[in-house]
Amino acid sequence: TSQGVRDYSLPVGLDANVHVDLVVVGSVAVSEKGWRIGKGEGFADMEYAMMVSMGAVREDTVVVTAVHDCQVVDIPEELLGEHDLTVDYIVTPTRVIRTGCTRPKPRGILWHKVSHKTMEKIPILRSLRCREKQAGKDVTLQEERTDTPAVAPPARRAGDVRPESPTLLNESGPCPASPRDESVSASSDRLHEFSTLYVGDIPVAARVSEFKAVLRERHATPSLLTWQGAQHRAFLRYRDKATAEAAVVALQGLSLHGCPLRVEPAKAQRSKVASSGP
């Protein structure tokens, strides 16, 4: 499950020497021909393409999806794009379908399909794009294409994140090491510790969906939620320090399943951990 991934998975960098024998993807709908439709954000396709770039998967790597029988439907081929991942097997409660799909799977990142917004959501793409540019590949992003109609960009607001990092704007030097671009890096944590809240004492029976509902009720929905239910904690990242401070006030007296939760700035929690060390 996604919660299990958050609780127990380990980050894998671009330089990791891994080989994936089987890829399991989720689907909203899938056809017996092996054509699938996801939620529309393209994350599964992107993850597969990144694994191709790492050498972790090959064209013959088996891709499986597990769905209910009612999710197996006819899908018009015109709905598929060159970046869409197809599947080799469909597993339902009543049958296993071997699709025999011959449509090519993604052979890497199609940069002209990637937006600046996606680059911000998946930081490690910056390192991969830098590497591929130095290797001589075309890494032109969606908004940078010259063969698309010009559209005026939205007005920038104070505090907006720049769409490009300085590293990519001046790429004459070496690419940054991939751990720098991973959301779990220590340096990134320190940059965001003033706008991140720690929520502790979460009961084991609590679910992330319940937690999100409570946050919405208290008008304290974060920009990013990291749920670590197995460790009885969660981290809430807000856009700035002021928003985080307002959320602390809004979440006073917060409880789940009758258990009071501890809410405090992540920086305070980090200091407690450091002071309790050897």
Image (tube, helix red, strand yellow):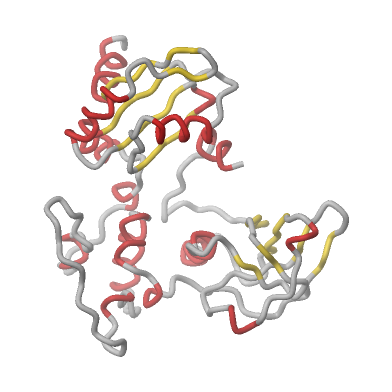
Q: In this view, which residue lies farthest toward the right?
A: 94
Image-quadrant location for residue 28: bottom right
Q: Residue 67 versus residue 176: which sits nearer the camera?
A: 67
Vertical position of residue 85 compared to residue 197: above or below = below
Image-quadrant location for residue 20: bottom right
- Counting from the top left corner in percent of width and height, residue 143 is at 28, 76
Q: Quadrant of the N terminus?
A: top right
Q: In this view, which residue lies farthest toward the bottom?
A: 147
Q: Residue 174 versus residue 227: which sits nearer the camera?
A: 227
- Counting from the top left corner in percent of width and height, residue 53 is at 47, 66
Image-quadrant location for residue 99: bottom right
Which residue is rendered at x = 54% and y = 53% of the image? 18
Q: Is residue 80 left or right of residue 192?
A: right
Vertical position of residue 63 compared to residue 247: above or below = below
Q: Residue 36 versus residue 119: which sits nearer the camera?
A: 36
- Counting from the top left corner in percent of width and height, residue 23 is at 64, 57
Q: Is residue 67 left or right of residue 273?
A: right
Q: Residue 132 versus residue 188: which sits nearer the camera?
A: 188
- Counting from the top left corner in percent of width and height, residue 210 is at 52, 31
Q: In this view, which residue lies farthest toward the front?
A: 217
Number of residue marks: 0
Which residue is rendered at x = 49% and y = 22% of the image? 231
Which residue is rendered at x = 31% and y = 16% of the image? 273
Q: Quadrant of the C terminus?
A: top left
Q: Is residue 181 left or right of residue 55?
A: left
Which residue is rendered at x = 15% and y = 50% of the image? 159
Q: Is residue 237 left or right of residue 5?
A: left
